[in-house]
Image: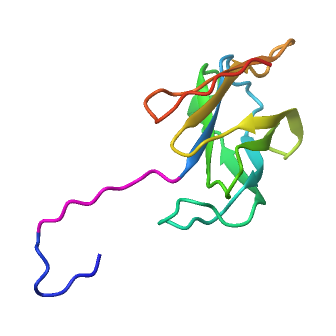
Amino acid sequence: LEVDENTDTEQTITLFRRVAKFELVAKDALPDNLASVDIQITGGAMSVDVESGLGGDAVVQTKSITVPASNIGKRNCIFSSYLFLPEGVTEVDITVITKDADGEELVEYLFEDVEVKRNTITRYSGMMFGKNPSFELSVDAEWEDVNEWEF
């Protein structure tokens, strides 16, 4: 939109969500020694062409999330990361590593071939810290689409 002194002051602009979102929901209580969660995504992009909606070159991106002390002991905590999708990319690999305050690994999960789509939340939820951790997949229908998987 080019603006000058003759541009109408009221404009209708349509915005399009150009990102995909990955969410991990820890259904069990966060343990006392949990300090951070790293989400590493292989195959997404760090930049996007806003007109086409296509991401740049595929990269490995890592988001480190510091867990607030107020969340310790809580259930159903959500950890998330956004990604742009290069042309033709519909699947990424995601590694989630939880760490204590000293940076020591508590648990690690590798989710391979995770289906992702622009304007869609891909959500994995499950028991993250128990003796028999497990996850289920659901997608938030408030976005454009739903992808559901079992593993």
Percent of width and height locating residue 2: 27, 81
Q: Quadrant of the C terminus?
A: top right
**Can residue 121 be found in the magenta stretch?**
no
Q: How many marks?
A: 0
Q: Residue at x 45, y 50 (%)?
A: 17
Q: Give the prevailing secondary structure in the magenta stretch.
A: loop
Q: Position of 96 compared to 120: left or right? A: right
Q: Where does residue 27 sit, x and y in percent of width and height?
A: 65, 18
Q: How is the image coloured?
A: rainbow
Q: Is 118 in front, or is 59? A: 118
Quadrant (top left, top right, bottom left, bottom right) of the N terminus: bottom left
Considering depth in this image, is 69 or 116 the residue closer to the camera? Answer: 116
Instruction: Specify the segment rendered in magenta.
Output: 10-18
Look at 68% across and 60% down and name the residue there: 45
- Position above or below: 120 against 125: below
**Residue 38 locus on image (x, y percent):** 75, 45
Which residue is drawn at the image coordinates 26% and 60% (left, top)? 13
Q: Nearer the viewer, residue 30 or 44?
A: 44
- Which residue is most to the bottom? 5
Residue drawn at (51%, 32%) of the image: 145
User: Residue 100's x, y, as percent?
Assistant: 81, 39
| Residue 117 image-quadrant placement | top right
Does the magenta segment cover residue 17?
A: yes
Q: Residue furthest top?
A: 132
Q: Quadrant of residue 146?
A: top right
Lateral position of residue 77 relative to residue 1, left or right: right
